[in-house]
């Protein structure tokens, strides 16, 4: 049986039918679709604002850490220099400790012998030692051109001194460098020796 629907209300006064959308076989009213779309846009906007806030926060934290690092860098450089100097001093201390304690080298006795054997016109500029070697740097002067004789005599006396040679080996006179100071001949020399037997 067919039902006929008669509507006597004029067309302009009739309620318009709401359009519906079919999504996956379901009938959704237009208001729901518009609401879902608006909600999705708002959700995307909120996510964007949150991500932007996180980025701004991380950028501010990065700038703060960068400023802190730049403030620390000069102090870090000073600390690095101090640490480097400390390591150098520790190495020297361990070398001296090894030479004075473990090897039992009596350096004061050797310095006295150096002083006692120093001929006239010869002077020492530097005495140095490390774990392996002993160095004596000096110069000789003579107005009668005998400076070379003084240096060789000094080295020969050290080579003949048994006390000085204790704990030292291979005592040698290196090459002698000649120079003039106010028309006076000066001979610079270096004596080397190995520490240990």
Image (cartoon, helix red, strand yellow):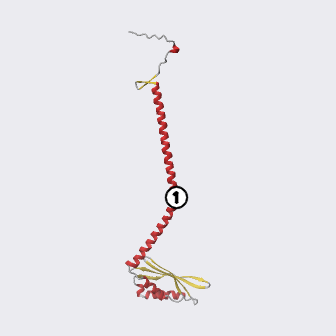
Q: What residue lies at 52% left-to-right and 55% top-to-bottom?
A: 67
View extreme (bottom): residue: 144
Q: What residue lies at 49% left-to-right and 45% top-to-bottom?
A: 55
* Whether residue 114 is situated above or below residue 22 in the rendered picture: below
Give the residue pinned by disc 1: 71
* Whether residue 33 is situated above or below residue 84 in the rendered picture: above
Q: What residue lies at 44% left-to-right and 78% top-to-bottom?
A: 133
- In front of the other: 136 or 76: 76
- In front of the other: 121 or 80: 80
Q: What residue lies at 47% left-to-right and 25% top-to-bottom?
A: 31
Q: In this view, does 186 lie to the left or right of 104?
A: right
Estimate the x, y position of residue 71 in percent, counting from the top left.
Answer: 52, 58
Could you tell me which quadrant the C terminus lies in? bottom left
As helix, strand or loop, the secondary structure at mark 1 comes to helix
Estimate the x, y position of residue 162 in percent, counting from the top left.
Answer: 41, 87
Estimate the x, y position of residue 18 in percent, counting from the top left.
Answer: 47, 21
Q: Is residue 99 among what the camera can see?
A: yes
Could you tell me which quadrant the N terminus lies in? top left
> How many numbered discs sit on the rendered protein?
1
Estimate the x, y position of residue 194 in percent, counting from the top left.
Answer: 42, 79
Residue count near mark 1 (Cα–Cα under 10 Å), binned few <14, some 14–19, many ≥20: few
Q: Is residue 131 among what the camera can see?
A: no
Name the quadrant containing residue 146: bottom right
* Whether residue 117 is situated above or below residue 62 in the rendered picture: below
């Amino acid at each position: 049986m067919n039902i006929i629907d008669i509507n006597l209300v004029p067309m302009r006064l009739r309620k318009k039918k709401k359009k519906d959308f079919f999504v996956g076989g379901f009938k959704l009213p237009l208001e729901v679709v518009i609401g879902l779309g608006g909600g999705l846009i708002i959700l995307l906007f909120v996510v964007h604002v949150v991500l932007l806030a996180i980025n701004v926060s991380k950028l501010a934290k990065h700038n703060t850490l960068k400023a802190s690092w730049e403030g620390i860098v000069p102090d870090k450089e000073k600390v690095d220099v101090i640490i480097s100097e400390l390591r150098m001093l520790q190495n020297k201390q361990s070398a001296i400790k090894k030479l004075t304690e473990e090897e039992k080298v009596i350096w004061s006795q050797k310095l006295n012998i150096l002083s006692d054997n120093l001929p006239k016109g010869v002077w020492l500029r530097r005495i140095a030692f490390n774990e392996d070697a002993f160095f004596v740097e000096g110069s000789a002067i003579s107005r009668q051109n005998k400076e070379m004789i003084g240096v060789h005599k000094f080295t020969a006396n050290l080579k003949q001194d048994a006390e000085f040679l204790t704990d030292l080996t291979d005592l040698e006179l290196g090459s002698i460098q000649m120079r003039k100071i106010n028309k006076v001949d000066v001979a610079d020399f270096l004596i080397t020796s190995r520490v240990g037997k």
